[in-house]
């Protein structure tokens, strides 16, 4: 018999640059037996990581157990240190927030971001809510900034973590116990000379300067802190909104922000499914050139099942190609996990052909019920006929009917998935043919025969898809339409540019895998990199209004833009065709599209709309049979080649990119129905009282 002996060893520097040890860094010195302050303890954890090794020794040579020789995960040790501080400190006006508790995770994040840090030299860092400061310290050592401001008002909890950083000789840290929710804080940073090199830069738009990025400043912020003392806005939205008027720390140029967010907030800002695209996501798209989730929960909210198997598979291959082309190296234990699969109904019921697909949220309930030892035997065949009076009654089980219903739902879902796999390629052909026909009607003099042939081909494919889905219930058909919506705006067929609508689908790599033990509290959080866009259409419009000295109009346009983005949330099912007449009363759709060319690819001509109905299509073919097929279609049926009021009925507000939504605001401001005040905006778009964007809750998901 042998015993596994646990021992603590130090990581050694590796000569291989891509090795795991090299990614973590060299180890300095042996462990110290005593730590005078909490910061010394964190310093030790940041520089020395114990790792468990196994040695096989005979039982007779096994040494007596010694508690202090046991190895702990660094994340657990740091989390316990934070937890102990929380227990011993008095109550604070600022609630404790989440923290990264794993040094290895910090190193992996910095290794992933290292190529993009090269442009930040020299650089200053504004560190908002650093808390325990584990990521702050390692980022400081990596970038070596000129100055590193720690904006942390909660001295009760975090002073013992941050004080050792500021008291060392020649420290570049400076701790400011100011309130980050007080927007005056950011002006005071520059006005009081805490970043003198920044104040030497010209202000944006001053002395002929233009809006650019400020690579000499980097902001790192912990957005898990809840607003306090009556401040209801959230910092992340305020930071993004400040890009449009160059306030806060953007006054000398737009600044990159690396944010630490909860999983729910990350899903709001960087949705992975089109149906979840809301106001905050559209605002982030408008303000940023790139939004990348560096680390996070890859299986959050079971998004794979909502994306669709085929769409997710295409997306995964594209990301792998981009990462390989860019030379992105991911540690093996940080690889994004495969999504969990749905349970097989054959395991607990009659044997069916299992269709592999991602798990959905309701599957958890089914799995728990199958683990119940008193579950009903779903494989047993039901007895036919009426039982006799001598047959003993089955004991009443309140979960029996529920288990059978869930099992039947799972079996039907399995059949639905099989139909989806057959119908999806047909639907993709339909979209390609419709986009091609609509494009040719706009740009070419196509003949009547060509249009009728294409329209009949589209109608036949729609009939084929309808027959496949005929046996499915309404819920299954709604789910299929949702999956097709995801695929359509992933492929970019409708927009015509071939680019995905969602920023998530443009990601250069998969987020690093994280574990709950690497954070305190033990949940999964996300780290997102926001890189601003100085060339956004909004800032270009600002430049024009600065030259014309009409900044009041520009600020009012921003207010209208916020409210229009609100329709993406509050009226996510409302079509664009319902919104435009409210903003441009009396104008035809053709006239509006001539003023806003970005809308043209999303519109469908009446002849394309007729393919939705087999009766309308039959009528068109019968009436057009007497005309000369070689004539231009616009000459024979001009009313079917132009745009009518229903051309946008299938396009919802959430389907439009943020740039096109801004173009709508610009045209609205120029039109005869232009808004002169917020009351005009309210009357046109409706809704409740207009609230400032920074005055709305963020983590609720309703933004």
Image: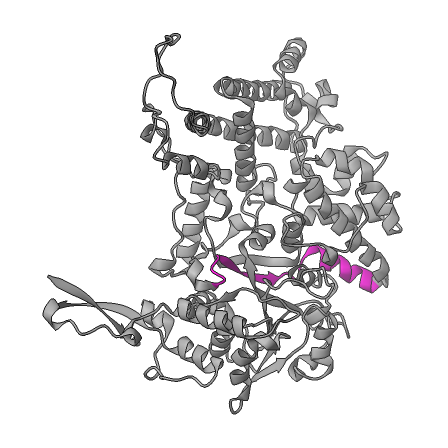
Q: Quadrant of residue 355?
A: top left
Is the residue 452 above or below the residue 668 in the image?
Answer: above
- Answer whether residue 216 is magenta in the image: no
Q: In which quarter of the image is residue 434?
A: top right
Between 622 and 233, the one lying in front of the other is 233
Q: Residue 165: tell me if it is visible.
A: yes
Does residue 300 appear left or right of residue 178 in this picture? left
Does residue 436 appear left or right of residue 73 in this picture? right
The scheme the figure's colours follow is one colour
Tell me residue 279's x, y (percent): 67, 49
Q: Residue 416: tell me if it is visible.
A: no
Tell me the residue at 53%/40% (across/down).
Answer: 491
Is the residue 282 above or below the residue 685 in the image?
Answer: below
Is the residue 617 above or below the residue 479 in the image?
Answer: above
Question: Which segment did they paint magenta?
Answer: 520-547
In which quadrant will I find the N terminus? bottom left
Tell me residue 487's x, y (percent): 52, 37
Tell me the residue at 39%/23% (across/down).
Answer: 395
Q: In which quarter of the image is residue 356?
A: top left
Tell me the residue at 74%/51% (across/down).
Answer: 562
């Amino acid at each position: 018999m042998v015993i596994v002996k646990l021992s603590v060893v130090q990581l050694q520097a590796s000569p291989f640059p891509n090795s795991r040890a090299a990614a973590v860094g060299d180890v300095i010195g042996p462990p110290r037996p005593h730590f005078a302050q909490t910061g010394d303890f964190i310093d030790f954890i940041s520089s020395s990581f114990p790792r468990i090794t196994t040695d096989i020794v005979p039982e007779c040579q096994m040494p007596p157990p010694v508690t202090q020789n046991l190895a702990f995960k660094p994340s657990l040790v740091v989390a316990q240190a934070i937890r102990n501080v929380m227990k011993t400190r008095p109550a604070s006006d600022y609630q404790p927030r989440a923290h990264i508790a794993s040094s290895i995770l910090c190193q992996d994040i910095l290794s992933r971001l290292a190529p993009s840090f090269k442009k930040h030299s020299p650089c200053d860092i504004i560190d908002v809510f650093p808390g325990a400061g584990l990521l702050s310290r390692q980022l400081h050592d990596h970038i070596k900034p000129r100055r590193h401001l720690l904006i942390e008002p909660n001295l009760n909890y975090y002073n013992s973590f941050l004080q050792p950083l500021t008291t060392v000789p020649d420290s570049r840290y400076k701790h400011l116990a100011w309130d980050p929710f007080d927007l005056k804080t950011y002006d005071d940073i520059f006005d009081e000379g805490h970043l003198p090199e920044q104040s030497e830069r010209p202000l944006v738009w001053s002395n002929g300067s233009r809006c650019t990025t400020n690579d000499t400043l980097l902001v790192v912020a912990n957005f898990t802190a809840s607003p306090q003392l009556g401040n209801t806005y959230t910092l992340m939205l305020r930071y993004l909104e400040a890009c449009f008027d160059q306030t806060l720390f953007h006054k000398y140029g737009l600044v990159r922000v690396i944010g630490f967010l909860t999983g729910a907030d990350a899903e709001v800002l960087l949705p992975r499914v089109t149906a979840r695209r809301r106001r905050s996501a559209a605002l982030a798209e408008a303000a940023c050139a790139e939004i990348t989730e560096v680390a996070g929960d890859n299986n959050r909210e079971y998004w794979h099942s909502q994306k669709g198997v085929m769409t997710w598979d295409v997306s995964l291959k594209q990301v792998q190609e981009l990462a390989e082309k860019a030379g992105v190296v991911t540690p093996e234990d940080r690889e994004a996990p495969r999504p969990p699969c749905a349970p097989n109904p054959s395991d607990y019921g009659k044997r069916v052909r299992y269709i592999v697909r991602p798990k959905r949220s309701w599957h958890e309930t089914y799995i728990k019920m199958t683990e119940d030892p008193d579950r009903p035997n779903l494989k047993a065949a039901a007895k036919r006929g009426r039982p006799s009076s001598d047959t003993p009654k089955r004991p009443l089980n309140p979960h029996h009917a529920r288990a059978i219903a869930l099992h039947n739902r799972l079996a039907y879902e399995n059949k639905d998935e099989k139909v989806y796999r057959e119908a999806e390629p047909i639907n993709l052909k339909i979209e390609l043919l419709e986009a091609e026909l609509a494009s040719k009607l706009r740009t070419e003099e196509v003949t009547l025969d060509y249009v009728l042939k294409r329209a009949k081909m589209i109608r036949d494919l729609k009939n084929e898809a309808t027959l496949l889905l005929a046996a499915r219930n309404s819920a299954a058909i709604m789910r299929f339409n949702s999956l097709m919506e995801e695929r359509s705006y992933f492929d970019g067929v409708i927009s015509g540019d071939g680019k995905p609508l969602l920023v998530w689908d443009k990601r250069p790599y998969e987020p690093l895998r994280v574990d709950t033990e690497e954070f305190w509290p033990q949940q999964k959080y996300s780290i997102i990199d926001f890189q601003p866009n100085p060339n956004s259409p909004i800032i270009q419009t600002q430049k024009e209004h600065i030259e014309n000295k009409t900044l009041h109009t520009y600020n009012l346009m921003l207010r209208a833009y916020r409210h229009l983005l609100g329709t993406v949330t509050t009226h996510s099912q409302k079509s664009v065709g319902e919104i435009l007449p409210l903003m441009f009363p009396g104008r035809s759709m053709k006239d509006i599209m001539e003023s806003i060319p970005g809308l043209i690819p999303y519109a469908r001509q009446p002849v394309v709309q007729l393919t939705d109905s087999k009766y309308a299509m039959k009528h068109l073919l019968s009436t057009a049979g007497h005309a000369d097929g070689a004539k231009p279609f616009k000459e024979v049926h001009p009313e079917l080649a132009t745009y009518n009021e229903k051309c946008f009925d299938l396009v919802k507000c959430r389907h439009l990119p943020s740039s096109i939504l801004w173009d709508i605001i610009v045209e609205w401001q120029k039109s005869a129905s232009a808004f002169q005040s917020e009351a005009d905006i309210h009357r046109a778009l409706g809704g409740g009282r207009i609230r400032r964007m920074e005055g709305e809750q963020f983590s609720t998901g309703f933004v």
